Image (spheres, rainbow, N blue to C red):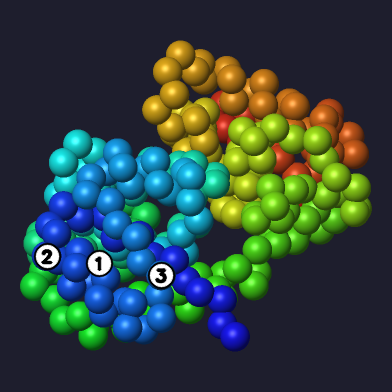
Amino acid sequence: METPRYILIVDDEADLVELVSYNLKKEGFIVDSAPDGETALKKVKKGRYDLLVLDLMLPGIQGMELCRILRKDPKTSGLPIIMLTAKGEEVDKILGLEMGADDYITKPFSPRELVARVKAVLRRAEKEMMSEKLIIGDMEIDREKYVVTIKKKPAQLSATEFKLLLFLAERKGKVFNREQLLDAVWGDEAFVEPRTVDVHIRRLRSQIEEDPANPGYIKTMRGIGYFFEGK
């Protein structure tokens, strides 16, 4: 018996929510809904959803902003999102995808197409889940469990240190300055100084490097920033 999939529809148009819910339920999905961004955010934090159908134009927190918030939180960063909106201009589609949406459908739409898109996005997400572990040399990063091991021994990392390490490891060889790392890992958190990056890099090295003074994983490009080289 297949595991049921939970879909959250975030839209303030009751008729549309009813139409989408009906078609998804016919396909065996369990469907919930939220009329605005704030409600959706609360539901996502409390519940377990496999995919969001997210309207762009919402009361309160807009769809783009909600997508950004979810993508910056490690607990929801991998949640599949399909944007469903009346905005069909190419720039809106590109912006939505760049913000982290997995797919983009414009209104009016075919319910059959929406169901097909939902299934396709879930299939892709399942394939990605099969490769949740990133292995580089003696390091293994488990994206799902937020665990890092070096030679099978766990590294004691904070959530922020894990995010920083994963961000660099997934972009092996690319150099990032402090401001770029702050934006990627800390986001809009207030009162975070650029030197905070250096502190976390030192802490990371103390946990993952055999010789923190001569690191093999996280390298410094003097005067520019940091990059992940690996062994």
Work out whether residue 72 or residue 226 is closer to the camera in this orientation and state it: 72
Residue located 80% across and 35% down the image: 156
x and y percentages locating residue 197 in the rendered image: 59, 25
Q: Secondary structure at mark 3?
A: strand
Residue 124 lies left or right of residue 228; in this view the side is: left
- Number of callouts in the render? 3
Residue located 19% across and 36% down the image: 60
Q: Secondary structure at mark 2?
A: helix
Confirm whether residue 102 shows in the render: no
Mark 1 vs mark 3: give the one in front. 3
Quadrant of residue 134 in the image?
Answer: bottom right
Amino acid found under the numbered disc labelled 3: Ile
Amino acid found under the numbered disc labelled 2: Asp
* Numbered mark located on residue 30 in the image: 3
Work out whether residue 224 or residue 30 is closer to the camera in this orientation and state it: 30
Q: Residues within 10 Å of mark 2 (few under 14, many from 20)?
A: few
* Numbered mark located on residue 15 in the image: 2
Placement of the C terminus among the 4 image quadrants:
bottom right
Q: CA distance from mark 1 to mark 2?
A: 20 Å
184 in relation to 120, above or below: above
Question: Do residues under tags 2 and 3 come within 8 Å of each other at their CB atoms?
Answer: no
x and y percentages locating residue 133 in the rendered image: 70, 62
Question: Do residues under tags 1 and 2 come within 8 Å of each other at their CB atoms?
Answer: no
Residue 95 lies left or right of residue 71; in this view the side is: left
Residue 154 lies left or right of residue 16; in this view the side is: right
Q: Secondary structure at mark 1?
A: strand
83 in relation to 124, above or below: above
* Numbered mark located on residue 104 in the image: 1
